[in-house]
Amino acid sequence: ISWSLNANASYNVNQMLKVSSLDGAGTPSEDEMVTAINVLGAHAGAYYGYRTDADGHNIDQTGDGVINEYDKQLLGNPVPEYFGGFGTSLRFSDFSLDISCSYAGGFDKLDLSSLYANEKAPYALSDKYVVAGDYFSLSKIAASYRFNFKKKGFIKGITARISGMNLFISNNMYLAPRSVVAGVSIHI
């Protein structure tokens, strides 16, 4: 029997220490919507747009009675503050089992599909479409068994395998393809 555990973890410090004047305007996408901006002291590529009230209307932050570019604010951080993974492997005779998990947290994700479905052009990002990006994922489960043949023939053995990828993700914002794969190897 052999059993192993592995783990890794990272903590990310993400802050703009220097910006150019071009960064302050943000970079528009193909549909001319600015979603991110670089501001001194904020996270790199911070989400940028309007804050909304309880009814979902953009808030006039300046109080001048007009909703415009001056009412936009930083909305979230696109870069995980922490991330990592862990796994285990178990081997017993001709059987093996491997499990891997990953996680990330302390960041936000854009729900652009909802924005495009619920708003009219020209599009403008608001906090309604910035959601927590934290997740935990069961990245892989794989099991295999090797059948060894004692006879002195052409085939020495056969290994049967089955594995599943992305079987569970805790945040429904991620559309990672789930898959199960089975296979057989012949040992000559």
Image (tube, rainbow, N blue to C red):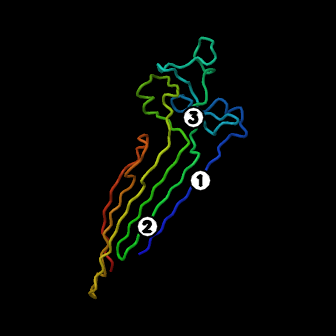
Residue 153 rendering spot, x and y as whole percentages: 27, 86
> Which label sits on residue 89?
2
Q: Does label 2 or label 3 sit earlier along the sequence?
A: 3
Quarter occupied by the C terminus? bottom left
The kind of residue tagged 3 is Gly
Mark positioned earlier in the residue sequence (1 or 2): 1
Q: Quadrant of the N terminus?
A: bottom left
- Cα separation, mark 1 vs mark 2, equals 22 Å
Residue indicated by mark 3: 76
Residues at circles 3 and 1 in contact by the CB criterion of under 8 Å: no
Residue ranking furthest to the top = 65
Query: Mark 1–mark 2 contact, CB under 8 Å?
Result: no
- Disc 1 residue type? Ser
Of circles 2 and 3, which is in front?
2
- The Cα–Cα distance between marks 3 and 1, rounded to whole angstroms, is 20 Å
Image disc number at residue 10: 1
Please report the residue visible at 59 percent of the width from the left and 11 percent of the height from the top.
65
